[in-house]
Image (cartoon, grey):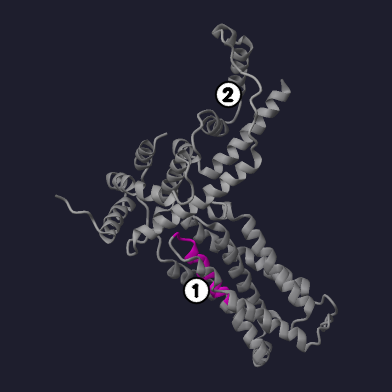
Amino acid sequence: MQTNEFIEQLSAQLEPVRVLRSPGLRAVFWLAMVGAVSTALVMRYAHMDSVLQRLAVPRIALECVATALTAITAIVAAFELSVPDRSPRWAWLPLPWFVLWLAASGLGCLRNGLGLHGPAGVFGHSGDCFAFITAASVPLAVALFWMLRRARPIAPLPVAALGTLGVAATAAFVLEFFHPFDVTVIDLSAHLAAVGLVVLLGMAWRRPLLDTDSAN
Amino acid sequence: MPTALTPEETDQAWSQLMRAAQAGDRAAYSRLLLAVTPFVRALLRRYCSHRQDIEEMVQETLLTMHRVRQTYDPKRPFSPWLGAIAARRGIDGLRRRSRVARHEVSAEIESYETFADPAANIDIEAVRAAGEVEELLRRLPPRQRAALEAVKLKEMSLAEASAASGQSVGALKVNTHRALKALRALFQER
């Protein structure tokens, strides 16, 4: 088919569309929505005394801030990259905070003498942490991909990777409020394995999740 | 004598046409697509020199632009938005060609496939087989049959087939694959 005929076909199929709001605004909307629900859950179910006691330790406070900033920056970057004309450099935005999160958690492991045993044995509550991060990521990811897919990203791989990193980091941040003990190597590994699993699933299912024909 | 537009003026004109297209103005959209085609073609020449492949990538770019037109923000310049889409389709085209090249070998022609006497080329068996293939095609689910006919029999590009059938490029790929698999199974049943 000639390109001119193709253009005629496309023009004949044209329907009006509603222009998407700016990616930054959409990211803020998602973060505000999730922030409100998470705050309500934390206020209702977390033991605030224990939380405040833990947050008084600068390293743990830093870990929490780094986790939250990883979530926020990854979500903002995912929304920015979901539209065509944004710089690919947005993908690096969460990296410093993610490294800081790993460093602060790793420091906790070092302070605990790299011992595998936490207060509750080798595996302790690590299985619960893994289950919490993966399970909590599911509704967050549904809400996120529901918004992201409206843009039908032309480069879905970084959008899916950053989006799922954002939701897994959000789940890990909320977990901090229900985690009344310091991390061990096993525990940190469980957190990272859960984040990795969520990111891998998001990347694997990127095409149906993001309603796109592009592969990368 | 009309003066040529500066790049900024051209961009503004395209942006206005796109805004009208987002509101559903088909005439403006048609004008826009015709106007941007040479720009897209020039961008895609960086990725490929084969004329037919470039035309296919131009159509894929226009189809993607059509699918994501809701993401264009009229407050921003139009050319970088379209350029990013063309670059993505160019990279996809490069990857696709290198994938195909890895799986294809050039065949040595050892003998002529047609005879000097035209009557010798009329193969009754082939005619009968074509009828059987047609019968098997009719037994496929409609979407699979439409995908197979458009992509493999009419040799349309994925973009053309997508515009003609209303199926997305991804759905076309899946349905073509499933149709071939179903056809293979139907042949084995015979």
Residue A172 coordinates in the image, percent (x, y): 65, 75
| Kind of residue at badge 2 | Arg
Secondary structure of the residue carrying numbered label 2 = helix
The residue beneath circle 2 is B138
Residue B2 coordinates in the image, percent (x, y): 16, 51
| Kind of residue at badge 1 | Ala
Between the C-alphas of marks 2 and 1, the distance is 53 Å
Residue A86 in magenta stretch: no
Residue A30 coordinates in the image, percent (x, y): 50, 69
Residue A28 coordinates in the image, percent (x, y): 47, 72
Name the residue at 58% across, 70% down: A166
* Figure check: A122 above or below A110: above
Q: Is residue A195 left or right of residue B151?
A: right
* Figure check: B95 above or below A74: above
Q: In the rendered structure, the residue with mark 2 lies on which chain? A: B
Q: Report the residue that reaches farthest toward the left.
A: B1
Secondary structure of the residue carrying numbered label 1 = helix
Residue A103 placement: quadrant: bottom right
* Figure check: B21 above or below B126: below
Same chain for mark 2 and mark 1? The answer is no
Main SS of the magenta part reads: helix
At label 1, counting other C-alpha atoms closer than 10 Å, the crowd grade (few under 14, some 14-19, many 20 or more) is few
Name the residue at 62% across, 78% down: A67
Q: What's the magenta region?
A: A70-84
Residue B13, label in figure: none
The residue beneath circle 1 is A32
Residue B124 placement: quadrant: top right
